[in-house]
Image (cartoon, rainbow, N blue to C red):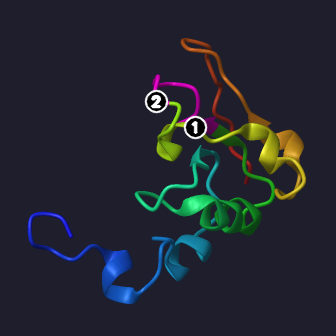
Amino acid sequence: MVFGLKLPMEIFGQRERLMDEHLKMKAPDAILFDFSDSEWYFILEGAIKLANAYPNTPLLLHHWGTIDAPDFATFNGNPEVLYDKVVNPNRMILLAPGEPFILKSIK
């Protein structure tokens, strides 16, 4: 509960915040992909569902290794756990800080 309000996961009795609408959109040209196992986002299982719903969309991985909080799952996703779970894992993109990404239409 946050400030007396129930969070979606408390209301619906689930951890992930992924909705069916997330999985039925026109394929995006890229996904800023949070794959941490955090109920603040989609949790790892939900993130994998989202990635696999759009198997040709580049995945720009973030929320891992960006904050010095080793015991805080939200910031400590490990990209290695995705390779055998994500369809077309070669589309996962690990950018260094400041490294450019050229967005291209996947049509």
The answer to which quarter of the image holds residue 101 is: top right
Q: Is residue 104 left or right of residue 85?
A: left
Name the residue: 58% across, 33% down.
Answer: 64
- On the image, the x and y values in percent for residue 15 come to 48, 73
Percent across and percent down for residue 105 are: 68, 44
Residue 65 falls within the magenta-colored stretch: yes
Alpha-carbon distance for marks 1 and 2?
8 Å
Q: In this rendering, is residue 33 above or below 45?
A: above
Q: Residue at x 51, y 78 (%)?
A: 21
Q: Which residues are magenta?
A: 61-69
Query: Which SS class for mark 2?
Result: loop
What's the magenta bit mostly, secondary-structure-wise? Answer: loop
Q: Which residue is mark 1?
A: 76
Q: Residue furthest top?
A: 98
Disc 2 crowd, CA 10 A, few/some/many (<14, 14-19, 20+): few
Q: Give the amino acid type for the residue marked by disc 2 in the picture.
A: Ala
Secondary element under disc 1, as helix, strand or loop, is: loop
C-beta proximity under 8 Å, tags 1 and 2:
yes
Please, which residue is most extreme toward the front here? 71
